[in-house]
Amino acid sequence: MAKFILGRILQAIPTLLVIATLTFFMTRMAPGGPFDGEKPIPEEIKERIEAHYGLNEPLHEQFLLYLSNLLQGDLGPSFKYIGWEVSELIAQAFPVSAQLGLCSLAIALTLGLPAGIVAALRKNSPWDYVPMSIAMIGICLPTFVLGPALILLFSSKLGWFSPMGWYSISDIVLPSLTLGLFYAAYIARLTRAGMLETLNQDYIRTARAKGAPPSQVVTKHALRGGLLPVVTFLGPAFAGLISGSFIIESIFFIPGLGRFFVTAAFNRDYTMVLGTVLFYATLIILLNLLVDVIQAALDPKARTQ
Amino acid sequence: MSDETIDDIRGNSAQPVEVSSLWRDAWLRMGKNKAAMASLVLFILMFILCFVTAWFCKDPNAVSLTNKFATPSVGHWMGTDALGRDLFARILYGGQISILVGLIATTVSVCIGVTYGAVSGFAGGRVDATMMRVVDVLLSIPFLVVVIVLQAVFSEWSSDTSAWIVKNWKWDKTFTDRFTNIVPLFFALGLFGWLTLARIVRAQVMSLKVREFVEAATALGYNKFRVLFRHIIPNTLGPIVVYATLTVPSFIMYEATLSYLGLGVEAPNSSWGILIKEGANFMETHPELLILPGLFFSLTLFSLNFLGDGLRDALDPKASKD
Amino acid sequence: MSLINIQNLKTYFHTRAGTTRAVDDISFSLEKGEIVGVVGESGSGKSVTCHSILGLLPQPPAKIEGGSVTFNGSELIGLDPPLLRAIRGKQISMIFQDPMSCLNPYLRILDQVAEPILVHEDVTQEDAERRAIKMLEKVGIRDAASRANSYPHEFSGGMRQRAMIAMALVTNPDVLFADEPTTALDVTVQARILKILRDMRGELDVSVLFITHDLGVVAEVADRVVVMYQGKIVEQGNLVEIFKNPSHPYVKGLLACRPTFETKYRILPTVEDFLESETTPDGVVTIRERPDSAERLASLEKVTAASPPPTNVEDLAILLKTDNLQVHFHSGGGFFGKPREVVKAVDGVSLRIQRGQTLGLVGESGCGKTTIGRAILRLVHPTGGRVMYDDTELTSLGGKDLLSYRKRMQIIFQDPYASLNPRMTIEQALIEPMTVHGLGANRSERRDRVVALLEEVGLSPTHLLRYPHEFSGGQRQRLCVARALAVEPEFIVCDECVSAMDVSVQAQVLNLLRDLQDRRGLTYLFISHDLSVVKFMSDEVSVMKEGRIVEHDRAEALYHNPQEAYTQELLEAVPQGDLEALQKRFRDNA
């Protein structure tokens, strides 16, 4: 197991290098630069700034410099937030996004899993149709419609929560609900499909032939196989959730990583874009590894492979 | 348990049934699925509404500052927006863009995904390992950054193209702009949307490749090209159709998200994402500006998703509900 | 009082397509200490009977329409689910056909075997586990205490079935339902499992309802036999009586159509030679004995006499030979994977096949027999040795040269469901090989050839525009034969091509192959795990084990005078189901 994990981590290094290369050249392909603001600055000053950040060097030398800094763990300074290191910005914004993501995930799992399981067990009954119809609405309703709608209801009309900002504990409720409901819908559908497939397996019939009560058949025999697809889905989904959703963060004015990232991309803040992309990719790779480890724990066949 | 299982029980003694191809078989099953058929009708109606009816509507970009936030009337069926533009016309024209983006981006990604996945799965070995590695790498790059960059790269190109068409072909400028405007979006979505499909097709091809009818084809001396295109790929069409149907709504959703971010369609043109964004600004005073485009948008997604679920049940009876 | 008494049981399946009478008014009983064999082909309703009794059927679409089943005098049909559960797994246990899919892949064997005790008895986990290990030892799993911690995929097929049996018997039930428990197993493993079941009957005093499609297996274990056909019981009674003197035409047909070591027919009788059946629109089936069945049998016997064994020396020229053929597979590998392991699937095999003759290749699963067939046809690449076809070396051929040999050699696979492209009509599937090889001048000429081919394999040309899924298994295998014949080959590899079929269908396909051989002078490599079928089909037989040939001889000589211990073991393990063996078994018991 240790060898497997080590192997995967070693494999991640070339992957990350390729991603860094792709992103570096892709961002440079886009027209404009970090210092083409709305207010034009004098050409002379702009050149001096660019020289300061090494942007006047040939592209391949800039790239090599970036790589050598990266290998030393230095993500460089932000071009837009003067005086800030990219790593400092990430360290500040990530916890905000992670809190929001964890809350949403908790909501998604507590709603989605039971709904999917019940729907599969009571197939073709109201217990199936009602939650699955709601889930269908859930995946069709974009977060940027649901978010404003929730604000309209809970803060404008009822006044229970403040409409935006990130100041008190209660500020987390509406955004994580918006994000969580979408994922809950997705997880419910995935769980139902997985459970239905497992419940049709021959070994479920064996368990019934042993005289085991239905509850035990489900908990002991069906759940593991039924939830494997959900586990696979959760890896990348979790990475997406905790690294921040730009839409949610901009609807609710939350200073999370997603907003920093998109703002950086708009502003051609090259180092910030690269830094967040690499951070996100690392997160994905690590979480996919975690998914594989969890799968191995759940599925003995995956363990021997 | 379904009819198919009964056939299994009857086993070799099963009488041949009077139906023809698997496609027709699936179509018959689908006909019995009321939700899916209703969705199909709904989507066709929506399509006609956006692409036929729209031509008879008012100019969606005609500003009338004297007639802001008008209530529904004979002249403006759904009232007007903050600039006095006819909301119904804007929703229909917006729908054109949203549906077109969904359909064309799906076509692009299906073409790339099927070819890539089929070649990778059929070749196997080192080629396969390398090709799938590329997919893995692309999947760990955040989708949004790619779209933003591609959008920026292609937008200059698209305005150049638009100017060229207007100059050489004498097309109407607003009309041309409306479509060249979204070309970058097709590329951005299509170029990165095929990754999951490539994986699905690859898995299908790998399992079909060891099936006995493919071995029989090799034994009969068919070349690789024939085996892949006549015998393997036609058998992956079921999952591809299902996936494609479910991809259209997800691309429509992406388009809306990007337009919401200001990355998609440019003003004054509309798309559902833009209308929703504009509506959200006035939701406290004029919620219908958010609700009406949201309704059209959600209904379309709803019908496509139900259609996809229905198709899956029809094409893969084993995974079906009953 | 009978232990289990079934009276007029009816189970129907109601679906959109209509009602299927899966079990239609059957009555029989199981006495204490008895083993009753329930025999029938797929779809005869034998498994549904068991599932109905235990309430394991998915309802809907299944519905028990009537009848009664008593266990120790108390009614089981319509019993409250909790009460039925208390009986299920405690007093009546069940084992299933495919132990791989019937064992939970996520749980240790030990947990699964101990589960019935924990469900039904108030004991501690340790007690249950101790009893489970003891039972695993009893069914012949050595070193049970440590192996019980394994997961199902770490067990072999035979071991898994033993674990299933242990799981069923661990609660000391009164009745065991065994649903095709040995069908997926090799003959030697099957023989051992059957012995365990017989031993357990004596040791644990359990009565067994043994369901199988194989009359030979029933003859090995059962005291009484119940024969089912299309949901009905057509005959039941004492085993020896039925084997000696079957009264129902279906049972006569079933007994006659299975090839045994002693079969003298050159063309097998089929069930159709004995009966006619008629289905009314509301699904009622009537079965009648054919009035002319005696004449039909007599005419079959004449076929035997009419075909002289080929003696001409020129006819016996060697068509295909392999010299020291090797196929090694590499597992593992990859960028950072495990170290590579070499699997020697075929490890130095030399075969000779004479023109117009059949070489049988037998062996147990995993012995490499299938790989040989594929290596000869270059579907897998041989790693060593030579394949000589008509004095041409095939192993080094490529491109056009290989194509011309592809035309001369064909293969028929085991699973007719997987062997036809589901997206092509029969016409497309049969015309395609002709187009590729340039046979037939134009489309209409090819079409005529297709029609002729279909007639040759016994199918109607009206089937041309249909798709494979509209055909039954036997018909599909005929289509596969027709497709192979479309390129006019001289040599055909039959790879387990009747293994998945019911005996009555198997007889038809074997007859077809025989008939084609006689008419077209075909040469066969007949690969199978079924020794009786190989004996019936082959002129010479090679026995394979672990990638090598252990024995080769003329079929008669090999079966009557096997030299190698492994061949002897294989032959002894085959359930014969002939009258002499039966009578001997009952004498021994008495």
Image (cartoon, rainbow, N blue to C red):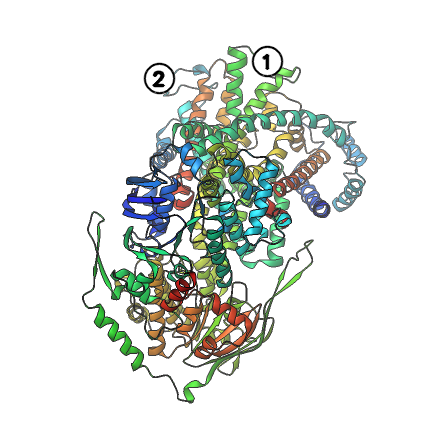
Q: Amino acid at mark 1?
A: Ser
Q: Residue furthest front?
A: C590
Give the chain of mark 1: A
Residue C408 location (% of width, % of height) = 43, 76
From the viewer's perspective, tell me whether residue C65 is left or right of residue C81: left
- The Cα–Cα distance between marks 1 and 2, rounded to whole angstroms, is 36 Å
Note whether A208 is above or below C476 in the view shown: above
Q: Which residue does the numbered mark 2 point to in the structure image?
A: B73
Foreground of the two, A20 or C447: C447
Give the chain of mark 2: B
Disc 1 to disc 2: CB gap under 8 Å: no
Is the C terminus of chain B in the top left, top right, bottom left or bottom right quadrant? top left
Residue A9 location (% of width, % of height) = 72, 44
Residue C9 location (% of width, % of height) = 29, 44
Q: Amino acid at mark 2?
A: Ser
Secondary structure beneath dot 2 equals loop
Residue A162, which numbered label? 1
